[in-house]
Image (cartoon, helix red, strand yellow):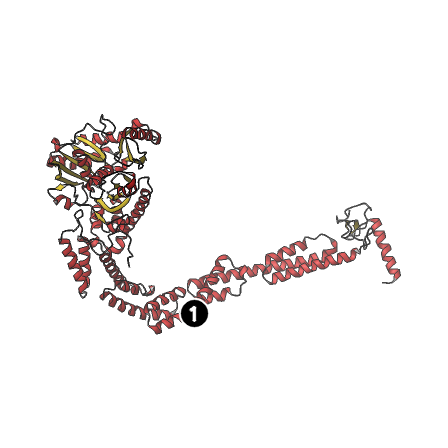
């Protein structure tokens, strides 16, 4: 451009500025107008360098002299670069990003960038069209990949999805692609490992690897052929192991058979072996012999007559069942399993009390461990027991009683489904068990929330007791379920009995939130023949007065003259404190010099677990103290669980629980009982831990189970003994 043309251009610009000419539509506007009157285009903007107001048509800024044309050219280049960036994003299938950039350019209204805006708009339309086609292609590929996956064609899945950018795949397709790639990688590794194991003739591993291959690729023909061959070898090998009595190895081999080859024959082999393995384990770890163990050993011996050792085991168990137990208090003969209790000492059922003379053991032997509550009730009637108070209200001083001990009395224990009674007679300073009674209801339970139903279930049993035993001339002490009482155990300061009684009354008033006139309270404080520094253990047991009244009314309406009423728990405390005098220390002198030794000896304790139908009591008794807790779970729970899994009624389930040898799938059906017992043990362990934290220290030296539910097969082992690995 020559000098003349430059001057002419400058003059034209000056004229346009003076007239406010619009650069977009050339309309002349007033010099102070901000927008064009012809097209609405803004006429001014701020100088990018100094911020002064300039017209869009200006080439240079009048304030700072900046070359406005160069600045606009740079901005135009920036928009062209954005357009190029959007095209790159679209080529990489980043369509949302490309659309975002292009929408920004197409939104420009400045006439100076109109050509770029138009180009961006054309590009945007192409991107939208391309995005639609691409997404359709992606969706088709994902659907085909899904179908290929369902048919087990991993290669087709990879083929369909490998060319699609990861960000275009939905989460399901992305996960499918990654999983399939992993499978293909695993498949190659498994195939290599399979060749090695086949060469080594490790058929169990071969079976497992073939199973994995067919899970990855169900249509794998080579794996299917290998599966048939390895199944035959595994079955043959499992039979050999079973014939050798190695049932655990036989199970491992049978369980290695690929799923595609499992059929009625293999399932029968698995079932038989699982049963024999379960029985073999019982023969190895049960702590005591029993009639059930004898039946189980016979089942196993008959199934494998070639194994002389199984026949020998069965004969030995049968012989032991006919022998008399070495331990005087229990009726069971030791076997192979661990008999050590996790609580302390040896675990065993307490069947035959040694502190009383028993004229006939027949009843005690017929229902072992079931009469101990009844014995504790009768003991309180005929002798001086640890806890002298009971739940019948009498006018007496706090820790003495005007009641004279009877020369004979009945203890009547009414359980959930049974009635047990013991008569104890005191003759020549000896206590004798002179009679007994046992009856069981045909209904599911004596106890009911409906008093009429409870009376209806109990009446035939009480009528039978009254008719057979005619107890009218003797006092009858009855029980109330321990779950109906609340016990609190404390240690009082080492004060005299009168002051201790006052402190205990204050404890009752401050710690029991229920009005005392609504309760019947039984109290006990340890005798004061103790070291001054030791303190005095004490107990408070409470029951709601309405429950006691209802209990007495029920019994009297059935013809029982109630001479005393005691809780199951306290009856067992009285029984244990009388029975285990051989465990308690004989302390001849009390002085500070031997206080540590005396305290250790006084803490020697026995543990009792009362296994009832509806409740389980844990009781710890030492020479000077005792503690108890009740769980609202009992033998009925495992009966119902077994009835459900074995599909039998309650009566049959109760029998099968004690003798599961008749269960066809014993290893599966009895699992409900095993799980229930393990759960109960866990709760007892928690309770026992609480007992060991009491102010009154306990050092258990023996552990016993009483009640009726302990006769459940595995009960003593699963509840009381230290755990042993069952392999």
The answer to whether residue 292 is visible is yes
Quarter of the image with the N terminus in it: bottom right
Under circle 1, the secondary element is: helix
Q: Is residue 214 left or right of residue 660?
A: right
Q: Is residue 192 left or right of residue 52?
A: left
Name the residue located 78 percent from the left edge and 57 percent from the top edge. Answer: 69
Residue 363 quadrant:
top left
Q: Residue furthest bottom?
A: 199
> How many labels, in total?
1
In the foreground, 5 or 580: 580
Residue at mark 1: 188
Residue 5 quadrant:
bottom right
Quarter of the image with the C terminus in it: bottom left
- Residue 135 percent location from the top left of the image: 55, 59
Q: Residue furthest right?
A: 4
- Residue 456 percent location from the top left of the image: 19, 35
Image: 511 above or below 219: above
Q: Residue furthest top?
A: 395
- Residue 307 percent location from the top left of the image: 19, 65
The answer to whether residue 453 is visible is no
- Residue 137 percent location from the top left of the image: 53, 62
């Amino acid at each position: 451009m020559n000098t003349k043309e430059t001057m002419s251009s400058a003059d034209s610009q000056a004229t346009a500025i003076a007239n406010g000419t619009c650069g977009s539509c050339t309309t002349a506007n007033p010099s102070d107008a901000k927008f064009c009157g012809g097209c609405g285009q803004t006429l001014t903007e701020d100088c990018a360098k100094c911020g002064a107001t300039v017209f869009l048509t200006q080439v240079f800024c009048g304030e700072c002299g900046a070359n406005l044309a160069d600045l606009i050219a740079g901005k135009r280049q920036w928009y062209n670069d954005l357009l190029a960036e959007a095209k790159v994003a679209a080529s990489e299938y980043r369509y949302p990003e490309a659309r975002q950039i292009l929408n920004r350019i197409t939104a420009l209204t400045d006439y100076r960038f109109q050509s770029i805006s138009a180009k961006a708009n054309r590009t945007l339309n192409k991107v939208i069209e391309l995005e639609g086609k691409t997404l359709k292609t992606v969706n088709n590929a994902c659907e085909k990949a899904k179908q290929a996956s369902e048919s087990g064609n991993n290669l087709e899945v990879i083929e369909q999805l490998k060319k699609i950018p990861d960000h275009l795949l939905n989460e399901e397709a992305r996960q499918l692609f990654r999983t399939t790639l992993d499978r293909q990688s695993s498949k190659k590794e498994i195939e290599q490992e399979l060749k090695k194991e086949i060469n080594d003739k490790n058929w169990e591993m071969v079976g497992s690897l073939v199973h994995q291959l067919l899970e990855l690729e169900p249509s794998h023909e080579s794996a299917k052929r290998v599966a048939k061959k390895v199944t035959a070898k595994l079955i043959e090998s499992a039979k050999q192991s079973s014939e050798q009595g190695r049932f655990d190895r036989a199970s491992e081999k049978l369980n290695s058979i690929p799923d595609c080859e499992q059929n009625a024959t293999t399932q029968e082999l698995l079932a038989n072996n699982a049963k024999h393995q379960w029985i073999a384990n019982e023969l190895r770890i049960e702590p005591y012999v029993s009639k059930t163990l004898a039946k189980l050993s016979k089942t196993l011996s008959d199934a494998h007559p070639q194994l002389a050792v199984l026949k020998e085991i069965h004969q030995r168990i049968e012989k032991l069942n006919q022998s008399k137990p070495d331990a005087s208090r229990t009726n069971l003969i030791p076997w192979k399993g661990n008999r050590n209790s996790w609580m302390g000492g040896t675990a065993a059922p307490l069947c035959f009390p040694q502190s009383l003379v028993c004229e006939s053991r027949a009843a005690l032997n017929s229902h072992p461990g079931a009469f101990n509550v009844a014995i504790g009730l009768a003991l309180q009637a005929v002798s001086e027991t640890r806890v002298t108070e009971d739940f019948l209200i009498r006018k007496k001083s706090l820790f003495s009683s005007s009641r004279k001990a009877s020369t004979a009395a009945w203890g009547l224990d009414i359980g959930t489904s049974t009635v047990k009674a013991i008569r104890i007679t005191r003759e020549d300073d000896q206590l004798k068990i002179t009679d007994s009674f046992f009856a069981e209801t045909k209904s599911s339970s004596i106890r009911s929330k409906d008093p009429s139903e409870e009376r209806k279930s109990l009446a035939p049993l009480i009528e039978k007791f009254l008719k057979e035993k005619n107890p009218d001339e003797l006092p009858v002490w009855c029980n109330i379920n321990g779950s109906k009482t609340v016990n609190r155990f404390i240690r009082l300061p080492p004060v005299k009995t009168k002051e201790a009684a006052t402190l205990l009354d204050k404890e009752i008033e401050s710690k029991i939130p229920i009005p005392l006139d609504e309760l019947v309270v039984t109290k006990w404080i340890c005798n004061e023949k103790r070291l001054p520094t030791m303190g005095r253990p004490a107990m408070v047991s409470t029951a709601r007065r309405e429950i006691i009244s209802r209990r007495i009314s029920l019994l009297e309406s059935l013809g029982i003259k109630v001479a005393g009423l005691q809780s199951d728990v306290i009856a067992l405390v009285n029984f244990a404190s009388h029975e285990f005098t051989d465990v308690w220390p004989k302390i001849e002198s009390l002085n500070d010099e031997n206080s540590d030794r005396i305290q250790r000896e006084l803490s020697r304790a026995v543990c009792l677990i009362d296994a009832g139908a509806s409740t389980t009591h844990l009781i710890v008794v030492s020479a000077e103290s005792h503690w108890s807790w009740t769980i609202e779970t009992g033998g009925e729970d495992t009966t119902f669980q077994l009835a459900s899994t074995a599909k039998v009624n309650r009566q049959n389930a109760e029998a099968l629980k004690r003798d599961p040898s008749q269960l066809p799938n014993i290893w599966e059906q009895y699992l409900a009982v095993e799980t229930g017992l393990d759960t109960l043990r866990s709760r007892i362990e928690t309770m026992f831990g609480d007992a060991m934290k009491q102010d009154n220290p306990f050092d258990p030296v023996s552990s016993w189970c009483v009640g009726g539910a302990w006769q459940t097969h595995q009960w003593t082992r699963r509840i009381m003994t230290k755990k042993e690995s069952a392999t």
